[in-house]
Image (spheres, rainbow, N blue to C red):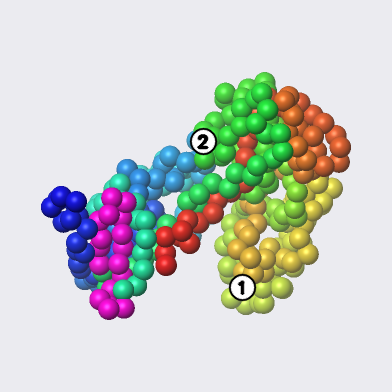
Amino acid sequence: MDGEAQGRRRPAWVPGAIIVGAGPSGLAAAACLAARGVPATVLEMSDSLASTWRHRTYDRLTLHLPKRFCELPLLPFPQGYPAYPSKDQFVAYMESYAAAAGVAPRFGARVEEAAFDAAAGAWAVRLAGGELLLARWLVVATGENAVPREPEFPGAPRFAGRVMHTRDYKSGEVFSGKKVLVVGCGNSGMEVSLDLCRHGAKPSMVVRNTVHVLPREMLGLSTFGIAMALLKLFSVQVVDRILLAAARLTLGDTGKLGLRRPKTGPMELKNLTGRTPVLDVGTLGHIKTGKIKVVGAVKEVTRSGVRFADGKEEQFDAIILATGYRSNVPSWLK
């Protein structure tokens, strides 16, 4: 090993905290620490801040919640932003936020391992390439969307059409006139199905499990905002009953559309499992008219389409996996 390589592997003390991730949480943590005089080094494995928002989201994406619930500490959204900013507006806001707070992430810094070194009384963070950093504090701000979940269906390799995860989906324009199977009925699956429909595609959406769908707004007010206000007054079970009654009045019986609700209410389920209710932005209307089909679980993929668990077979030109992500933290945090 040459001298330069040895130097890279000597532990280097970093004042204050190491923050892993330069998304909204990492930037906010760095800004709040800086405001209190605590230095921080932000490590980001990609080449830009807010990389998930910038590179792994579809064109039509907007915030699902009103901007007042999504503001980062110490800096409001610019005046003139709409109630639900677009992804480009949110990225621009984060760029301005980092500049205003003096946060300059170190890009291309992939953490391979982080563990507390009791002898040194510090966190030891090893980067790809072997560089070792030591810091008193470690903040993990990588979110839950690091690694795409990509289920493997029997027969998938023989499918003649295109298969992609929503991380690579940008617009339904390229699927105009095509039959597309969207696997997953969370917020991404619902929005991608809607986007496909609006671009002239013929989407079918796989719904295997129960799902809570709520209107994004009720009586002109954010459903999430209403829920937060009610939770200050009532138990989560009471709030869920109110939300579900209002949702039924607004959306109708979603079970008749193939979207069965869980027995546990939406807010309680979020607390217990982390499963977020779907906020409808127009998808249900197209399901009701038949422009978006709801189908059951996939049994296997054929050369020209899919065979479902109920034995029915249908042809598709493309399959889009709206199957979410998982955290990569367990692979490197010891």
Q: Kindly give the residue lying farthest to the front in the view shown.
A: 1
Distance of label 1 from label 2 (alpha carbons): 37 Å
| Residue 199 visible in the displayed image | no
> Splitting the image into 4 quarters, where does residue 284 fall?
top right
Q: Kindly give the residue lying farthest to the top in the view shown.
A: 177
* Number of other residues with Cα within 10 Å of mark 2, as a class: few under 14, some 14 to 19, many 20 or more: few
Magenta stretch in the rendered image:
118-134
Q: Position of residue 221 (x, y in %)?
A: 60, 57
> Splitting the image into 4 quarters, where does residue 118 fall?
bottom left
Looking at the image, residue 177 lies above or below residue 314: above
Which of the two marks, 1 or 2, is nearer to us in this view?
Answer: 2
Residue 168 badge: 2
Q: Nearer the viewer, residue 88 or 134?
A: 134
Q: Position of residue 169 (x, y in %)?
A: 54, 34
Identify the residue shown where x is 47% and y is 51%: 146
Q: Which residue is mark 1?
A: 231
